[in-house]
Amino acid sequence: MLARERIIDLLANEPGVEIVGTADNGMAAIEAIRTRKPDLVFLDVQMPGKTGLDVVREIGADAMPATIFVTAFDQYALRAFELAALDYLVKPFDDERFEQAFRRARRLMELREMGKLREQLLAVLQQPTPSASSVRGSPETAYLERIAVEMRGKVRVVPVDQIDYITASGPYAELHTGERTHLIRETMQTLEERLDPHQFIRIHRSAIVRLPLVETLHRGAGGDYEVQLKSGLRLPVSRSRREELERRLGVMP
């Protein structure tokens, strides 16, 4: 979601560009491409339901518009796309890298080199690629290592290992790193799924904490619980998540 919003914002500054649709999963992407027939698609490799490569296979390389792949997995992107794809963006990407990929795509489309683009898509499909389950299950690539945040018109990369805890703020999430807070437009559900569960645990619908920073589990009046971090900060623990937290902390029943 974060990358999609960022691409939308960047495209808004490009002359002659109309965004005809977005999709948040593979099946929706297939439907949108077939019905709206865009000239250029930014296609995430890792999506719910079907991967980006599944989308290309379903539609067919001959029927696919020009495609720029987006991926969070550096090694996967380099192996599968470096020589074969029109272009690819590794999340988080900066303005300059986006501009480079977009300009290349626009130039090739203006030159009517769609045959070359189709050949590149076919080459991508012929690359040996892992299944969606194996990609999600790979400990080396499955989880976020950094998160891009926008500050005063610039994009800054926050390493995940600097995050102490995360709290929800309406449609946004706040990343707390020491004394600093970074606001991103991302759901807590997505962050929970993309963060290493050995390092982070969701303790409430509006809070995710770094597990090694949990110092104390407090039980209050009425059976309510709170965690106290090493900084002294206390955060509420929902009853539905208390047992999992106790298990992860090694609390004996």
Image (cartoon, helix red, strand yellow):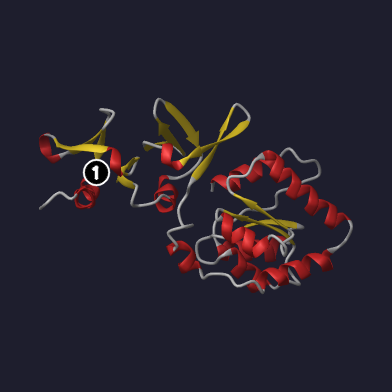
Give the side of residue 6 with respect to residue 61, left or right: left
Image quarter of residue 137: bottom left
Given the image, on which type of amino acid does mark 1 rest?
Answer: Ser
Image quarter of residue 26: bottom right
Q: What element carries label 1?
A: loop
| 23 up-or-down from 219: above or below | below
x then y, percent, for residue 30: 62, 66
Give the side of residue 9 with respect to residue 232, left or right: right
x then y, percent, for residue 226: 21, 36
| Residue at the (45%, 62%) spot, across then down | 138
- Of residues 12 and 115, which is closer to you in this image? 115
| 43 up-or-down from 222: above or below | below
| Residue at the (32%, 46%) spot, across then down | 202
| 245 up-or-down from 163: above or below | below
Which residue in the protein does label 1 denote? 238
x then y, percent, for residue 103: 79, 48
| Residue at the (46%, 58%) spot, across then down | 140
Image quarter of residue 175: top left
| Residue at the (48%, 43%) spot, across then down | 186
x then y, percent, for residue 94: 65, 40
Q: How many marks?
A: 1
Give the side of residue 68 with respect to residue 237, left or right: right
Tag 1: Cα neighbours inside 10 Å, few (<14), some, or many (≥20)? some
- Of residues 80 and 15, which is closer to you in this image? 80
Give the side of residue 53 with respect to residue 200, left or right: right
| 129 up-or-down from 92: above or below | below
